[in-house]
């Protein structure tokens, strides 16, 4: 019997836990069962208490104190420890039925999704080919306000594409916090970000202040942010990244306003399609009606 799960990923501040909260609320509204798993050993605030919490196994604060590691090294150590103790997950998840949507709330350390092979190992254990037999979908969140800075948006899109390639799962990419964009961008412009258009970088500016070459060459402090992140070389790099994304043609985004239940429901419908949730549900018997025998009048 296959189970169903969602891996919620993305950089720090993208709204992963907020999305999990909105999704749980929506599932409760439509009377669907869910099981909330927190896999962020540094998390400390939740609207809903996790049904399973990695902090009951290991916490980042303890690792940093006992191992004298920084936040990044400590987080990697926590995941390595989790992979050595997978029975912690199996004991809690094994009894769940196919009616549950298992939501995994992951940390915001981008290395976990791009080049450190810890999450792929975890996915092998969780996915259909592994012991837990979960039909998984990955949701990668990117903050919608990135569209104001085109260079930052394409960098975020590149990280989403990297995660898609590394995870090898059905995948939905989500522009979160859409409510923060009201009044900043119109629908016509937004369409070019929902389906990333490399030509965006050829329009007007990249969202950053432009500096001419002479200004950069004669800058008093070449380490200043505006000087490092502007100019011809930086623009060429951005265009190369945009072309790479365009060549792969893998990334498109769904729009999410976590305060709008209809928006959350739309995202859930894409996730259900990706994990084939409805196809696995048992058909229900139609309701029986008691019909009175017809009475016929004699003519």
Image: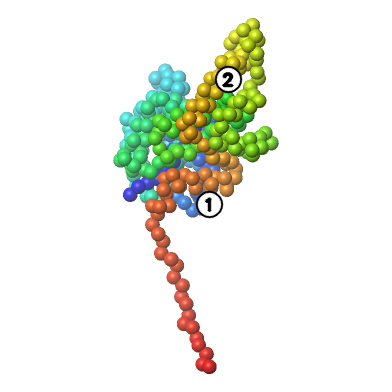
Of residues 187 and 111, the one drawn nearer to the viewer in this rendering? 187
In what element is the residue under mark 1? helix
Residue found at the very far right of the displayed protein? 183
Q: Is residue 60 left or right of residue 155?
A: left
Q: Position of residue 35 (x, y in %)?
A: 43, 44
Residue at which label 1 appears:
29
Quote the CA–CA distance across marks 2 and 1.
47 Å
The residue carrying pointer 2 sits among few (fewer than 14), some (14 to 19) or many (20 or more) residues within 10 Å by Cα, namely: some
- The x, y position of residue 94, in whole percent, is 34, 44
* Image x and y of residue 112, in percent: 43, 27
Numbered disc in front, either 2 or 1:
2
Residue 272 in sight in this render: yes
Q: Is residue 21 above or below residue 113?
A: below
Q: Which mark is residue 235?
A: 2
Instruction: Between residue 3 and residue 73, name the one nearer to us.
Output: 3
**How many numbered circles are shown?**
2
On screen, residue 298 above or below 146: below
Residue 227: mark: none
Front one among 217 and 19: 217
Q: Residue at x 36, y 33 (%)?
A: 122
Q: How is the image coloured?
A: rainbow
Sequence order check, earlier mark of 2 and 1: 1
Q: In front here: 39 or 169? A: 169
- Outermost residue on the bottom side: it is 299
Q: Secondary structure at mark 2?
A: helix
Give me the residue at 53% from left, 47% from top: 265
């Amino acid at each position: 019997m296959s189970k169903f799960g969602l891996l919620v990923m993305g950089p720090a501040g993208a709204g992963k836990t907020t999305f999990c909260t909105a999704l749980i609320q929506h599932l409760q509204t439509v009377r669907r069962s869910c099981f909330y798993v927190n896999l962020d050993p540094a998390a400390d605030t939740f609207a809903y208490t996790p049904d399973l919490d990695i902090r009951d196994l290991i916490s980042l604060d303890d690792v940093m104190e006992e191992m004298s590691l920084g936040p990044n090294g400590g987080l990697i150590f926590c995941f390595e420890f989790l992979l050595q103790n997978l029975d912690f997950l199996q004991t809690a998840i094994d009894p769940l039925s196919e009616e549950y949507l298992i939501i995994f709330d992951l940390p915001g350390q981008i290395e976990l999704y791009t080049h450190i092979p810890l999450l792929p190992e975890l996915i092998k254990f969780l996915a259909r080919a592994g012991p837990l037999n979960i039909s998984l979908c990955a949701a990668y969140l990117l903050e919608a306000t990135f569209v104001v800075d085109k260079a930052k948006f394409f960098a975020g899109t590149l990280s989403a594409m990297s995660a898609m390639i590394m995870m090898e799962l059905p995948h939905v990419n989500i522009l979160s916090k859409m409510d923060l964009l009201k009044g900043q961008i119109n629908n016509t412009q937004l369409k070019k970000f929902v389906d990333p258009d490399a030509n965006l970088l050829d329009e007007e500016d990249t969202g950053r202040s432009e500096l001419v070459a002479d200004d950069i060459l004669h800058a008093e402090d070449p380490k200043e942010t505006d000087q490092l992140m502007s100019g011809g070389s930086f623009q060429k790099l951005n265009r190369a990244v945009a072309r790479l994304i365009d060549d792969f043609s893998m990334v498109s985004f769904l729009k999410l306003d976590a305060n709008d239940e209809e928006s959350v429901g739309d995202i859930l419908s894409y996730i259900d399609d990706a994990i084939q949730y409805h196809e696995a549900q048992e058909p229900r018997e139609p309701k029986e009606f008691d019909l009175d025998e017809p009475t016929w009048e004699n003519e």
